[in-house]
Image (cartoon, rainbow, N blue to C red):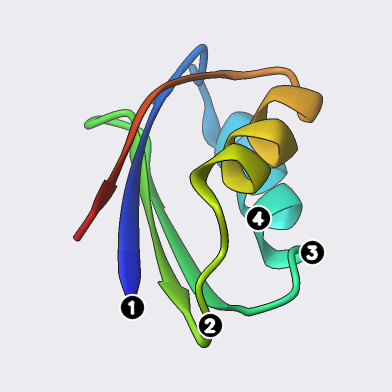
Amino acid sequence: MKKQIFIEGMSCDHCVKHVEKSLKELAGVESVNVNLQGKYAVVDLSNDISDALIKEAIEEAGYDVAAVKNA
């Protein structure tokens, strides 16, 4: 399963690394690809993770989530 997360507040490569790290720490996340230009991330999941949990991880890292969609 893949989810696409639209993220606001990222402005540099450091932001990308911070978001990647936060998402990779969630159990069930197999891979993370963050696109700075498009301001989104695509996560590959081995099991279903709630949108609320994904949103919480990103917000704890200091960024805002505009939307989470199944990819």
- Mark 2 vs mark 4: in front: 2
Q: Which residue is mark 1?
A: 1
User: Quick one: quadrant of the C terminus?
Assistant: bottom left
Residue at 32% of width from left, 69% of height from top?
2
Q: Looking at the image, is mark 2 or mark 1 earlier in the sequence?
A: 1
**Mark 1 residue crowding within 10 angstroms, few (<14) / some (14–19) / many (20+):** few
Secondary structure beneath label 4 = helix
Q: Which residue is mark 4?
A: 23
Q: Which residue is mark 3?
A: 25
Amino acid under label 2? Answer: Asn
Residue 15 spot, x, y in % from top left: 62, 30
* 1 horizontally vs 30: left or right: left
* 52 horizontally vs 7: left or right: right
Q: CA–CA distance between discs 4 and 1?
A: 15 Å
Q: Which mark is residue 47?
A: 2
Quadrant in the rendering for residue 5 = top left
Q: Looking at the image, is mark 2 or mark 4 earlier in the sequence?
A: 4
Amino acid under label 3? Answer: Glu
Mark 2 near mark 1, Cβ–Cβ under 8 Å?
A: yes
Q: CA–CA distance between discs 3 and 1?
A: 17 Å
**Mark 4 residue crowding within 10 angstroms, few (<14) / some (14–19) / many (20+):** many
